[in-house]
Amino acid sequence: MNPSPVLASPFQGEFRVTNVSDHEYPFQFQDNNGYLLSWWGEKLPGVDGHQGYDFPMPEGTPLLAVYDGEVTFAGWENPFYCPPLDKTVSGLGVVLRHRLPNGEVLLSIYAHMSEVHVRTGDQVRTGQVLGLSGNTGCSTGPHLHFEMRRLRGTSWPVFDPYGWEGEGEDPWSKHPSGVSSVWLWAEGKAPPLFAEVNLPPNPQPTDRALVAITRVRYMGVNDALNPNNEFVEITVDPRFASGPVSLEGFLLRNKLGETFAFPNLTLEPGASLRVYTGQGNPTREALFWNRTQPAWDNWGDCAQLVYPSGGRYRVGYRSGCAVTQGFKVLAEEKKDALLDAHRLPLP
């Protein structure tokens, strides 16, 4: 019998994800198939064989226990060689052991912390602060590496608390070293999974655009069925707009040249507007492209705001804006937390 969903998020708020748990297969630095297989069955870019989830967040963000449990480890891991950094490192982290209402035993793991506020042997409650996020150990940027494991015999194979909803049987559950996964998040408590570029308007000192792209959310859970998981946000920069700006003649375009034409409306200085990929009823804050398929490629794309004059404001990710023309701002997504590993000891 599957355990009941009881887990709470390991942090407050929302943070983008850079690596998901690889269902084919979680053997980091050994798997070289070129993709991560997400729990909804989509192949995504990232660290092959990644175990768990990476959430970039500011250093010092409080990290929370996902469920009642016992601290089996808290502190510095034994030093080990980190391939991404090409040196020996040691990271700070916490491991909790949980016994679910059905009696099953799980581990939750929190890696790359800057501070630890619990000790081995402590009993903790759901939502208790374990310490603060950081960038210690084998990490290329401040983030939380979060993973879970299920006890099977004397081993602790990786377990995805989001379960498996891809086509067919979960490949990881069929592997000799694998285990089945099941949704374990309590209602409304699962950390949302999305990838995005988020930046202020006109980030470079020489930029003077009246209207700028300030966010490109290019990945959510199963975009193919839920295209409104994607959106592009534009903002009127109050530093350069002295009054309302008409969007008549403005276009939004991806690297394939597929285009959304803005209706005749105006935005006040400082106001933002989102263009969702799917269908919906337009408002002053949200417009809809009315597509049935994703507009933004998870493997790299270039969001282009085309002005009536022909100039363009571009925001790219994963080298999606390789070529630029006309007026532009090129903001490529930082590759922080795309490479990491830990060696926190298991019970």
Image: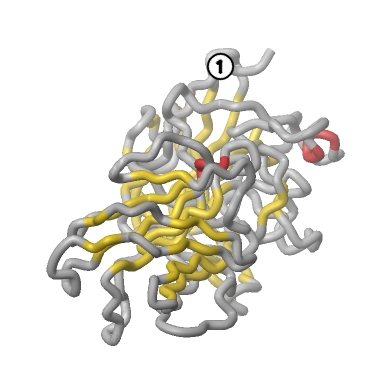
Residue 128 in sight here: yes
On the image, the x and y values in percent for residue 230 come to 51, 48
Find residue 78 and report its image quarter.
bottom right
On the image, the x and y values in percent for residue 236 come to 25, 63
Scheme by which the image is coloured: secondary structure
Of residue 197 and residue 193, the one placed in the foreground of this image is: 197
Tell me the residue at 72%/41% (across/down): 41
On the image, the x and y values in percent for residue 292 come to 62, 41
Image mark count: 1
Q: Residues within 10 Å of mark 1 (few under 14, many from 20)?
A: some
Residue 140 in sight here: no
On the image, the x and y values in percent for residue 46 come to 64, 60
Of residue 39 and residue 182, the one placed in the foreground of this image is: 39
Q: What's the residue type where badge 1 is placed?
A: Ser
Picture layout, residue 237 above or below residue 115 = below
Q: Image quadrant for the C terminus?
A: top right
Tell me the residue at 36%/44% (across/down): 286
Tell me the residue at 52%/82% (across/down): 324
Picture layout, residue 177 above or below residue 320 = above
Tell me the residue at 67%/38% (across/down): 40
Q: Which residue is mark 1?
A: 4
Of residue 308 and residue 115, the one placed in the foreground of this image is: 308
Q: Image quadrant for the N terminus?
A: top right
Picture layout, residue 5 above or below residue 249 = above
Q: Is residue 116 left or right of residue 88?
A: left
Task: Determine whether the residue tagged by mark 1 lies in a helix, strand or loop.
Answer: loop
Find residue 130 and report its image quarter.
top left
